[in-house]
Amino acid sequence: MEPDRGIFQKELLQIAVPVTVQCLLQSSFSVADQIMTGQLGSVNIAGIGLGGKFASIYSVVIAAVASVAGIMIAQYTGKKDDEETGRSFYTNLAVSLLLAAVFSLLSMVMPSRILGLYTDDEAAVERGAEYLRIYALSFLPVAVVSILSAYLRCVGAAKTPLYAGIFASVANTVLNYILIFGKAGLPAMGVKGAAWASVAAQGSGCILTMTFFSFLRRKNSWKIPFEIRMDKAHLKQYLVILMPLLACEFFWSLGENVYASIYGHVGTKAFAAMTLTNPLQALVMGALSGVSQAAGVMIGKRLGADDRTGAYRDAKRLLYTGFACSVLLSALIVLFDKYYVLIFDVEDDVRRMTMQLLTAYAFVAPVKAQNMILGGILRSGGRTAFVMLIDMIGTWIFGVPLGLLAAFVFRLPVAAVYFILSMEECVRAAISLAVFRRRKWMQTL
């Protein structure tokens, strides 16, 4: 084995495995919610799906800020610049907290009005509003955990958020069972119980992460000088990285919400079937998110140290690794989808639609995985405008028009609608690979 390949594999495992497990645990919040409330019927499944779709806008926006934090911290730790590392950490933490406050306010004040944009089914909107109004309380702890986790990954402590994630995941599952179905002497709360369980679990995970972070900071004497003030040069650099990425994630998520609206208007059963696929989709993407996160940290450090040859070489290795893993996961979905749908207490036609959707997803999952990893690679150099343009073209020029045509002009079944609009992933992959090979994304901050 080549010496540099051994180093690459060791670093990949140190970052990717803890991040992957943490993302899988994070995904398990929605998985546990949907599996348990799946015993309550299609309307409740659709309601949680609606609330989750709007919450997903917040999730990707916070993930964008955490990505910026990771890009900046990775490069500045590679340069051993403590002052800029501290500025990057505290500035992104402040931005995350502000976004959490805005999204929480919207979710608590006008949830029905927001969710009414997805579907005309008043019962599903009512259930979704109940869920979202409570679930919004988890937005603040999610923001804090995202930034702390970004820092910990960049300094080689990626396992630390994992431990907090394990605790939070177990707490979420236990509380779901108790609050949804009314165990341990408590009344059955249904959808509201699922929301309160997630809030309690996210809050406890945040407290634990903060405790670990504080302990490790003292133990390792990490220097994170408090500084959020910026001169014009720093502000310009920050906005050049943040705004394209923020716009990219927001409009991508908005596009995903347009897709959800399309499914919702196809029918409540179609939307319920699409919602039932979300746990598996989250688990597959969560399983591969470790490679994407590792790409940002590893390639960012290489670029910070001005090792462009090593950065490009390792980027290609990351792409090969992600593709092989995604093909394997797609095969497992096709093999076990008929057993998966039996978990839920829904109508037979909803089960059938879910299986068809999972087959369609299995075909596009490898391309989705490549796009996720390519995004992490291209962002590592700070050229986030590239990623913004690619995602905007894919989602709004191809995905949304194709979805509208398939659903409302040709009136195709929901699985066919999903597969056709997912062709935008192929467009994004082709453009991203072309940008990757030209190497203009390889910049040092």
Image (cartoon, rainbow, N blue to C red):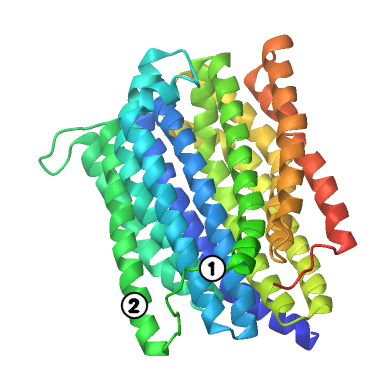
Q: Regarding mark 2 in the picture, which secondary structure is present there?
A: helix
The correct choice, above or below, for 224 with respect to 139 in the image is below
Q: In which quarter of the image is the C terminus?
A: bottom right
Of residue 237 and residue 205, the one placed in the foreground of this image is 237
Give the number of the disc on residue 230: 1
Q: Considering depth in this image, is 110 or 284 the residue closer to the camera? A: 110
- Residue 122 lies, in percent from the top left, at 38, 14
Residue 214, numbered label: 2
User: Residue placed at 85% from the left, 46% from the top?
Assistant: 430
**Kind of residue at badge 2:** Ser
> Could you tell whether 123 is left or right of 67 in the image?
left
x, y percent for residue 134: 29, 38
Q: Is residue 368 above or below residue 315?
A: above
Q: Residue 278 carries which label?
A: none
Q: Residues within 10 Å of mark 1 (few under 14, many from 20)?
A: few
Q: What's the residue at 28%, 59% (across, down)?
A: 204
Within 10 Å of disc 2 (Cα), the crowding (few <14, some 14-19, many 20+) is: few
Can residue 44 be seen in this snapshot? Answer: no
> Residue at image x 84%, y 63%?
440
Q: Nearer the viewer, residue 302 or 180?
A: 302
Question: Label 1 amino acid?
Answer: Met
| Quarter of the rendering containing residue 11 | bottom right
The alpha-carbon separation of the residues under discs 1 and 2 comes to 25 Å
| Residue 414 shows in this picture | yes
Give the mark nearest the N terminus, 1 or 2: 2
Image quadrant in which the N terminus is located: bottom right
| Quarter of the view holding residue 133 | top left
Residue 46 % position (x, y) = 44, 25
Task: Decide: is 256 above or below 24.
Answer: above
Tags 1 and 2 in contact by the CB under 8 Å rule? no
In this image, 177 relative to 164: left or right?
left
